[in-house]
Amino acid sequence: MDMTTSDPLVGATLDRRYFVESRIAGGGMATVYVAHDLRLDRRLALKVMHPSLAQDPTFVQRFINEAHSVAKLSHPNVVQVFDQGEDQGHVFLAMEYVPGQTLRDILKAHGRLAPKQALNFMASVLAALGAAHQAGMVHRDVKPENVLISKDGRVKVADFGLARAVEQSNQGLTRTGTLMGTAAYLAPEQIEKGTADARSDVYAAGIMLYELLTGGQPHTGETPIAIAYQHVTEDVPRPSHFLPNLPPEVDGLVTKATERDPRYRPSNAGQYLAKVLEVLRTLPDPTPGSAAPLAPVAPQANAAATMTAPQLIAGGAGPGTENATMVVDMNGADLGGGDYDDDDYPGRGGSWFSRNRLLVVGALVTALVVGVAGWWFLLGRYEAVPDVIGLSPEAASEQIRGAGLVVELSDDRVYSDDAAAGEVGETDPEVDSRLSPGDTVTVFLSKGPQNVSMPDLVGDDVANALKALEDLGFDDESIVQEEQDSPDNDPGEVLATSPEAGADADREGTVTITVSSGIPVPSLAGEKREDAEKTLDELGLSAEIVEEESENIDKGLVISQTPDTGTNVGPGASVTLTVSSGPPEVDVPDVVGDSVRDARKELEDAGFDVEVERIFGGRVVAHQSHTGTAPEGTKIKLTATPGGIDLGDLDEDEDD
C-alpha cells in the first residue's frame, strides 16, 4: 500500500501554515514529511511525533523546551530547527529540508570507507557536536541515520535534543532501568547509570568511526540488551584487527573515543575533532579508483544477530525509517548465563565416568580460555613503550610506530645523562609502560646532562663569556653579573667566576661572573686646563687638548670632555678636553688721525669699549692701544692731541 496516499496528514495543513506534501520516513518516535511553508514560501521537513508521545503532557513540555534550545544552535553542520507547534494533537517540528541521503545510505552503498573519506565525514559531524557541547547540549543519539549528506556534499547532523526530550519525559512515567538511545552506539555509562554527557557523544562518534572504517558495528547481538551488555563488559576491537595496513593513528582515534571509562576519552567533541584533524593531515589523498565500493571487513552475523535496536523497537521498520531512539527495559534482563537441565542438551546421556571426564576436560579448556583471556585483558592487548632513550628522533619514531603506537615530538627539552643533546632523553609514558594500541607516546629530546664543567672565562670579554655560557645551556635568568672597580683591567673583562673554572655547574642553578668596571672618568668641566691634566695623570689616563673659542667660558678653562663623566674606561685611555681659547677676535679699525668723536663711534660700532686721553685738549687721535685684531668687548685706549701730533709721554688730560 502507498504510504503517501494512506497517510491522513498528506494533503493536510498544520497550524494553518505547513502544507504536508508527502511522507518520506517513519520510525519508532516520529514520522517525517516534506512540507511547504505557506507563509515564507519555502520547502522544509516536518517531523510529527507519534500520538503515543504527543498524548504525554510531560513529553510535550520537554519537547518544546528542547526545541527552543536546538533552534538557538546555529552551525553549518547542524540541521536547523525553524519552528515547533501543535495542531489537533499533532506535535511537530519544522526543520531544514536536506535532500540527499544519510550516512547509513552511503555505508550500504559502499560497504566501508577509506580512512581519509571516513575522517572527512567525522570532522563535519564532530564540528556540529562540538558546537552543541559548547552550548551545553548533548545529542545522546549519534549514529549514521542522523547524519544527512546533501546532494552538494554538505554534512548535516539531525535530531539534536530529541532523545533527551523522550528520556526526561519517561522519568517518573516508566519504571527504573529504562535507557535511551540506539543500543549499537550507547556508551557504558548510559547503560549502567542512565547518565550522558559530552563524552557519551564522543563514544558514539568513535563507534560510528569504527563502522565507517570496517563496514560493521563492533558489538552485535540478537537483542538490544545483548548489545548493551557488550558495551559495558567488552572493549571495542581495534579496526586494524581487520585492516592490518590501517595507520596506528587512525586506530588510536577509535580506541581513545571508545574507552569504557569516560575519564579517558576526549572530554568533548571539540577535543576529539582536534585529534581527527591532526591525523587527517597525515593521510594521503585517495588513489584513483578508491571511490569504488569496499567490502566490509568486520564480521557479519546473520540478520537476526545484526538487527539493531531501532529495528527491533520500531517493529522491523525497513530502510529509510527514522530509527531515532530506543527504550530498553533493563529490569529483569538476563545479561549472564542461565541454569539448564540435562534435558536441555539432547544426546547428553552416558556413564557417570564419561560425564566426569567431560567435566574435567571442560574445566581444563575453561581454565585455558580464562587464562588466555586474562593474559589478553591484563597484558596481551597492551603494547610496551619501547626503549628509545639515546636514539635519534627518526629512529625512535620508527620503533614507536612499529609497536603500534602514535609518536608525538614535544617542543620541550629535558636534561639527560644518558642521551646527548638532540637525542631522545625521555618519553611520556616512560619506557616499558603498557599502552593500548594507537595510544600516543610523547618524545622529549635531550639538552644534555644537567651538570657541566665550568669553562675558564677569566680574561675574556663579558660578551664572549655570556655566549659561551648560553652555548652550554645556561639561560639569561641563571647568569648573574657583578661589577668591580679595577684600574688594571679593561671594562667588561671577566675577573672571576662562581663556580670556578673546572668545577661542576648546575644548568638549573646560578652562575656568577665578576666583571671589571674599569676607571670611571671624573667630571673636569670648569677646571683649569693644568688642573684637569694633573687629575687624569693621577688616574693613569692621558689628556688630549682641543681649543675652542667661547664668549662665556674664560680662556684656559675646560668647556667639555669626551668620554662623559662616569664613563668607564681602561687604563691608559685618552680623555679629550675641550679648553676655552677665549671669545672670538674681530678686526680693530685704524682710527689714528680721526676726530675723537668719529673714532669713538667707529670702534663702538665694531664692538669695542673706548677710553680717550686728551693732551692739551687735543681733539684728533694721535695713538690707539690695539691694532690688528682683538676680542670683541676689548677696551681700546685712544690718545688725542691738538692736530693729532704725537707728543710722546707728555702729561695728558683725561677725557670725561
Image (tube, helix red, strand yellow):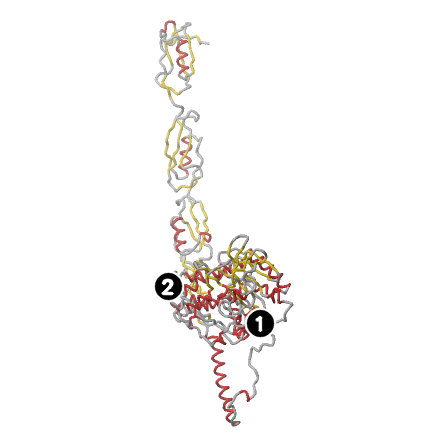
Image position of 615 with respect to 606: above or below: above
Mark 1 = which residue? 328
Count neighbours of disc 2 (C-alpha within 10 A) and say few if under 14, some if 14 to 19, many if 20 or more: few
Residue 37 seen in the figure: yes
Measuring from the top left, give residue 561's x and y in whole percent.
Answer: 41, 34
Which residue is nearer to you in this view: 45 or 216?
Answer: 45
The Cα atoms of the two marked residues, 2 and 1, are separated by 41 Å
Mark closer to the observer (2, 1): 1
* Residue 586 coordinates in the image, percent (x, y): 37, 20
Can residue 263 be seen? no
Q: Nearer the viewer, residue 297 or 61?
A: 61
Q: Secondary structure at mark 2?
A: loop
Left or right: 189 in relation to 242: right
Give whichever of 334, 317 is nearer the camera: 317
What amino acid type is highlighted by mark number 1? Val
Percent x, y for residue 288? 34, 64
User: Which residue matches tag 2?
Assistant: 286
Dot placed on the residue nearer the N-terminal end, 2 or 1: 2
**Amino acid found under the numbered disc labelled 2:** Pro
Task: Assess whether mark 1 and mark 2 are in contact (beta carbons under 8 angstroms).
Answer: no
Local crowd size for mark 1, using a 10 Å CA cut-off: few (<14), some (14–19), many (≥20):
many
Q: Quadrant of residue 196?
A: bottom right
Up-down relation of residue 597 to residue 413 (above or below): above
Point out which mark residue 384 bears: none
- Residue 628 in percent (x, y) is at 34, 17
Mark 1 falls on what kind of element?
A: strand
Count of marks placed on residues = 2
